[in-house]
Amino acid sequence: MNILITGGAGYIGSHTLIELDNAGYSFIIFDNLSNAPTESLNRVEKIINKSIIFEQGDIRDAQALKNVFLNYSINSVIHFAGLKAVGESVAQPLKYYDNNVVGTLRLLEVMQEFHCKKIVFSSSATVYGDPESSPIKEDFPTGATTNPYGRTKYIIEEILKDLCVSDPEFKSVILRYFNPVGAHESGTMGEDPNGIPNNLMPFISQIAVGKREYLKVFGGDYATHDGTGVRDYIHVVDLALAHVKAIDYLSSEQFSREHSIFNIGTGQGYSVLDMVKAYVKASDKKIPYKIIERRAGDIATCFACPNYAKEILDWEATRTIDDMCKDSYQWQSNNPDGYKNLQENNGSFKF
Ligand code: NAD
Ligand code: UFG
């Protein structure tokens, strides 16, 4: 029996493959490569020292999905596939609703057709919008999202809840990630954003290796300990391990529908300047920065209460911000152009 991993060539998916393999699970990867190179999968193969099965395809293509279900025995799905750039979702909302929402509908229809009724879904803290307070608990209000990307996550969560009500055999686990950062400790895998990074950690990493000049800190006047935005950064390997626990839980006697949505964070909030300091310490590089105006749509503070994941899934983050910065820097300094160089040398495409 295999797990189908949609979006498995991407940043979080590729790290999760390694932890699934360590835990003895087998899987099939399904990805349209719209935001990932196959090189990430080559690196996974090197780490786990075995070949993996990859099927290139789009989750909106029902026939392509059906072919995978026909060709392999699949009993559950981890659904990472999706577009994730907040700014792009504001500029091109239909692209996001089509890819993320329509794509998930197609996937769920095919799963139903093949009686595959277990799914882990990649949601996001973005479903909480601008929360009244932090730490955020799972029963805080959701839906007041600030951009189309966030709305796709909220809509998919609601679709999954409705589906589980309509079909008592259908089981879903929704993981609401906070801010995933860091890289595999081997230094061979990590985040490889396309173009200028939107997110803090990849931007800092590119400054550390001399690819960018300085960090624009978006806002120095928030009601936080140093005026800069506070987030709950989580190491991508801890996040990957949460998926293994979620898959274990879906198949366990303990599974209950009432307990199926989890915050995946550390419970610690760090500011932008805290992250800069930690990165300087980990890399021994200078990270120049300038505080500029706030970025539209940003909130002051967002960190998780992760107690529920600990209690029910038996999962908690163990990696510190020093680990996150050290591993990010190791990845970025070993691979200043991400997976790109190798892809170009291979003659295969990248983005
Ligand atoms: P990523 O872009 O690195 O990975 C997503 C993968 O999905 C890519 O490999 C891409 O090629 C693939 N994909 C996209 N659309 C597809 C489609 N229609 N059919 C098949 N494959 C498709 O992103 P990531 O950071 O690994 O994120 C994984 C998931 O977690 C996404 O759903 C994202 O929204 C969610 N998430 C990410 C973050 C974050 O900050 N990275 C935070 C919260 C939630
Ligand atoms: N920041 C800067 N300068 C930058 C980039 C970011 O100061 O160049 C600041 C932001 O203002 C924010 C913090 O760094 O205070 C983190 O910003 P990110 O862009 O890294 O992350 P966000 O919290 O804005 O959003 C991320 C993902 C979203 C996801 C959300 C919650 O990008 O997809 O976490 O999970 F929805």
Image (cartoon, grey):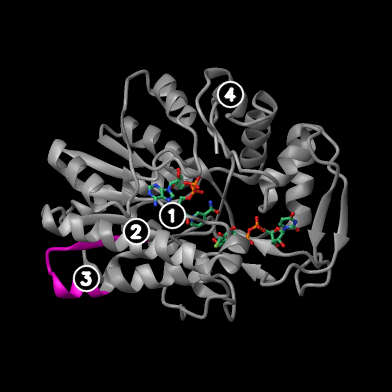
- Horizontal arrangement in the rendering, residue 15 relative to residue 120 (left or right): right
The residue positioned 60% from the left and 61% from the top of the image is 88
Mark 3 neighbour class, 10 Å CA radius: few under 14, some 14 to 19, many 20 or more: some
In percent of width and height, residue 240 lies at 43, 43
Q: Is residue 48 magenta?
A: no
**Which amino acid type is shown beneath numbered disc 4?**
Glu
* Residue with the mark numbered 1: 82
Q: Earlier in the sequence, mark 4 or mark 1?
A: 1
* Residue with the mark numbered 3: 163
Give the foreground label among 1 and 2: 2
* Residue with the mark numbered 2: 103
Query: What range is drawn magenta here?
Result: 162-174
SS state under label 3: helix
The quarter of the picture where the N terminus appears is top left
Is the C-beta of the residue carrying label 1 under 8 Å from the nearest atom of ligand 1?
yes
CA distance for labels 1 and 3: 20 Å
Mark 2–mark 4 CB contact (< 8 Å): no
Q: Earlier in the sequence, mark 3 or mark 2?
A: 2
Mark 1–mark 2 CB contact (< 8 Å): yes
Is the C-beta of the residue carrying label 4 under 8 Å from the nearest atom of ligand 1?
no
Give the foreground label among 3 and 4: 4
CA distance for labels 3 and 2: 15 Å
* Residue with the mark numbered 4: 344
Residue 54: which quarter of the image?
top left
Q: Earlier in the sequence, mark 2 or mark 4?
A: 2
